[in-house]
Image: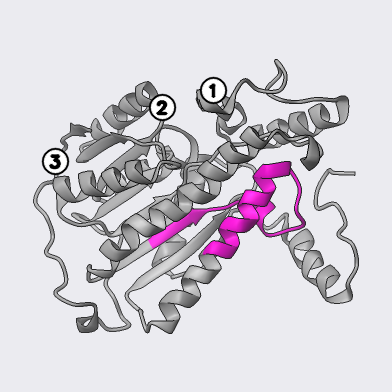
Amino acid sequence: MSVYRGGLGGSPPRASSVNDVTRSAPDPIAPGRVAVVTGAASGIGLGLAERFAAEGMRVVMADVEEPALSKAAEHVAAEGASVVAVVTDVADRAAVGALRDAALSAYGAVHVVCNNAGVGGPHGPLWECPPAEWDWVLGVNLEGVMNGVRAFMPVLLEQDTGHLLNTSSIFGVFAGTLGPYGVSKHAVTALTETLHFNLRSLGVRHVGVSVLCPSAVRTNFGTSARNRPAWAGPAAAADGGIRDAAERASAERFDQLSLLGASPADVAGMVVDGIRSRRFYILTSDNRHEPVVRRGLEIVAGDPPEPPVWFV
């Protein structure tokens, strides 16, 4: 764990009981409150950390990539924020528990949790995807989110206000594509919906949940294989696991859209607005509404899905 101190200190008091809190919970994003962000060394995660810091929050930044995380944490702290950096593999349940413990040790509370870390994967036929590839993608994208929920939800429930955000994708709300990645993102959306119903059934009103479903964002997500663990074995091909021309074209189109997408800072602003308004689904653009709506109509009609974007 690395600590980077800016201008903020001290710890806000914990709520004595969740039953003491009314529906009109305070803003979880406020000076002195604490945010935990996974996948925080770059992209959306770094954008979130920067925005929370700008709101006066103390930030715990987690990422599996230590050099990039240290650099990112130093950058955020240079703006005057109090930052703790914790190297974390979110697929490791014990590591996420250690992240929670580090946050509580440093600040005594957690008010906002962003389960944001994620990886890509091959876009080809599912039956050609090696089992280790499935284990890696689902381990980070799905089990990593559940590890965050398991570790942090009890902490959030102890506060006077809190919010948990899970990063899915626009590929997690319209017809399934993009191989194991798309499968994992649909699962994250369903997981977050279930979490919402869990909280509602328990009468919890002071802790909110949201699922972030970004469209194209300008990040280095396309090179996530740089953090591929040794146990997953080498990528299936030198180009990152792409096996044929059709899959290569799909991946290249995905990368091109990312270059034209929203900035991480813009997405972070949408997240902050969404948390404050208790918005459940947070989409980052309206140019994918049609395939989202069409999927619902196809399900009701019993029709096979049409490709949502450029897929054929």
First along the sequence among labels 2 and 3 = 3
- Which region shows up in magenta? 164-191
Percent position of residue 233, x then y: 59, 23
**Residue pictured at 62% horizontal, 20% vertical:** 234
Percent position of residue 183, x then y: 68, 50
Cβ atoms at labels 1 and 2 below 8 Å apart: yes
For the residues labelled 1 and 2, the Cα–Cα distance comes to 9 Å
Element at label 1: helix
Foreground label between 3 and 1: 1
Density class for disc 2 (Cα within 10 Å; few <14, some 14-19, many ≥20) is some
* Numbered circle sitting on residue 226: 1
On the image, which quarter does residue 109 sit in? bottom left
Residue type marked 3: Gly
Residue occupied by mark 3 = 7
Image position of 26 (left or right of 92): left
Element at label 2: loop
